[in-house]
Image (cartoon, helix red, strand yellow):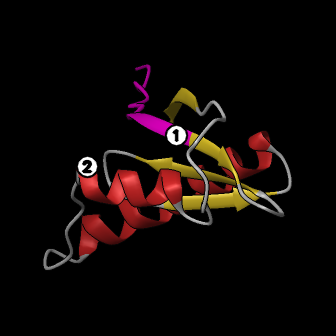
Amino acid sequence: MEQSIKMDFYTVVLRKSSLYWVALCLENGIVGQGDTRDEAIKKLKEAIESVQDILKTDFDSQSTPISIKELHEFLTVESEQPITEAYELRAVYA
């Protein structure tokens, strides 16, 4: 019997910080960071998988989508000037 693999779909916003890339998952507020976009996404996937494992056994834990205010803070952190850079939005399976 072939076992089906369940893949969860997540929406990720990537932005460049002063020293590294940051990936924010909109569905649960988890963040990953790395020297490159791909490394930030890899770290984010690892964090999402860790949280999923915890949620399977700890029924008191929760995972909730981030608010618009939190997204705004993520996009404007470290910014004293108006935002002129583009942000990247990706679909990620974890």
Mark 2 or 1, closer to the camera: 2
- In the image, residue 8 lies in the stretch drawn in magenta: yes
Residue that carries the numbered disc 1 in the rendered image = 13
Query: Compared with residue 62, is residue 58 higher up or lower down, i.e. above or below?
Result: below
Residue found 44% across the figure and 20% down from its top: 2
Q: How far apart are marks 2 and 1 (CA)?
A: 13 Å
Query: Compared with residue 33, is residue 72 higher up or lower down, i.e. above or below?
Result: above
Mark 1 or mark 2, which is nearer the start of the sequence? 1
**Quadrant of res 34:** bottom right
Q: Where is residue 65 in the image (x, y as percent from the top left)?
A: 24, 51
Residue found 27% across the figure and 66% down from its top: 55
Q: Where is residue 63 in the image (x, y as percent from the top left)?
A: 24, 62
Residue that carries the numbered disc 2 in the rendered image = 68
Q: Is residue 48 left or right of residue 43?
A: left
Extent of the magenta region: 1-13
Q: In this view, does 75 lie to the left or right of 59?
A: right
Residue found 78% across the figure and 49% down from its top: 39
Three-letter code for the amino acid on which mark 1 is drawn: Val
* One can see residue 66 in this view: no
**Secondary structure, magenta segment, majority class:** loop
Q: Is residue 26 left or right of residue 41?
A: left
Q: Where is residue 5 in the image (x, y as percent from the top left)?
A: 43, 29
Hey, which residue is sitting farthest left in the picture? 60
Q: Residues within 10 Å of mark 2 (few under 14, many from 20)?
A: few
Q: Name the disc covering residue 26, or none.
A: none
Three-letter code for the amino acid on which mark 2 is drawn: Ile
Is disc 2 placed on a helix, strand or loop? Answer: helix
